[in-house]
Image (spheres, rainbow, N blue to C red):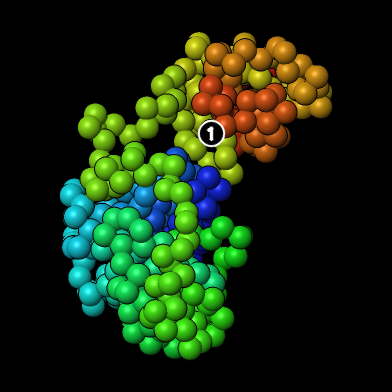
Amino acid sequence: MNLRQLFDPVSCTYTYLIYQEITKEAVIIDPVFELYLRDKALIDELGLNLKYTIETHVHADHITSGWLFKQSTNSEILISSSSGATNSDRMLGHGDIIEFGDIKLKSLYTPGHTNGCMSFVDQNESMVFTGDALLIRGTGRTDFQEGSSHALYESVKKKLFSLPNSCSVFPAHDYNGIMSSTIGEEKTFNPRLGGELSDNDFVGSMDNLNLPHPKKIDEAVPANLQCGFREDGSLLSNYPKWARLSYAFAGHWDISSDELFSVLSLVQVIDVREKEEYLGPLGFIKGSKNIPLNEISENKSYFDQQKNYVFVCRAGGRSVQAIKNAGLYKNQNAASLRGGMIDWRANGFSVENGKD
């Protein structure tokens, strides 16, 4: 089993991508709407077949991208039958098994933070994804969404703490930059319910947290009760319209040689090779402007944020750096030619000044 732990710095949410190496079947747990492009890029670059989006609960601090993945990958959305959510493909109960490749995750009903919280443990009980039930040296709050301190205490003590001490704990959030823990550590050191702390001790602590409500609760909860469904049925409203681009996990937009050829009259091509390379045997794309990479920064004023640019180099590496130096990184109007001039020539597109 392969695991990727991804992070949203705004809501401090951990998203988990789990996949089987041979079959490439995968699931994603608690994905964040604003980071859909990042997560989808990783799935595509690893060549994975996303089978399921799994929600540990109805989140109050961010909106899920489950519906976006359902549209783009035909994956299914899984959530607790106690969540009250609509638009899911499968409602989970305690003990249900989720299979992908040769991996099995078992659902554990762990209410308390909300009434619909689930945790998920692998078949070897070597790792558990605890959502907001059990955090690292903490727990989820219990003061909204049918939360119950008594229920959460029982969920952690009787279900999660019954797992092996060596079982790794992967929570839905951490606000201190800690990535994982173990059941043994939390049983011993968790200041809310570890050691000999009683139900009354826990309830007393939870009743006096005095936390403000999550900033996005009024927006997030209604959206997540629909599993992120969008009324207009669209993916992302700000997805580039001028060309079919692909978003790279590295954080920039790519364009293929075929697509660049089809939109060539609508863009300005910036070739960032040195002048001798630009005039060398690979040739250059007709109409391109040569600004070597080491001159991009000093020419920032040249670039109009509203125009469409494709940056080109020999093999597609320097062009990505050029986008950053031009101040256009993550700008949907700037893309790097994937594979550079080598790929352009390999696909048979014409060049100026080139040689066979």
User: Which residue appears at 43% of the width and 47% of the height?
Assistant: 214
| Near-viewer residue (160 or 153) | 153
Q: For mark 1, what is the residue?
A: 254
Q: What kind of residue is marked 1?
A: Asp
260 left or right of 336?
left
Looking at the picture, how far across and down is residue 90, in whole percent? 18, 60
> Is 249 drawn above or below residue 205 in the view shown?
above
Looking at the rendered structure, the secondary structure element under dot 1 is strand
Q: Residue at x 46, y 63 (%)?
A: 208
Q: Nearer the viewer, residue 251 or 137?
A: 137
Identity of the residue drawn at 50% across and 11% down: 265
* Numbered label tally: 1
Q: Between residue 340 and residue 98, name the one nearer to us.
A: 98
> Which residue occupies 57% across, 40% down?
251
Q: Is residue 328 left or right of residue 227?
A: right
Above-or-below relation of 2 to 254: below
Residue placed most toward the observer, 25 or 190: 190
Evaluate whether residue 71 shows in this view: no
Quick check: 203 above or below 241?
below
Q: What is the x, y in percent for residue 87?
A: 18, 48
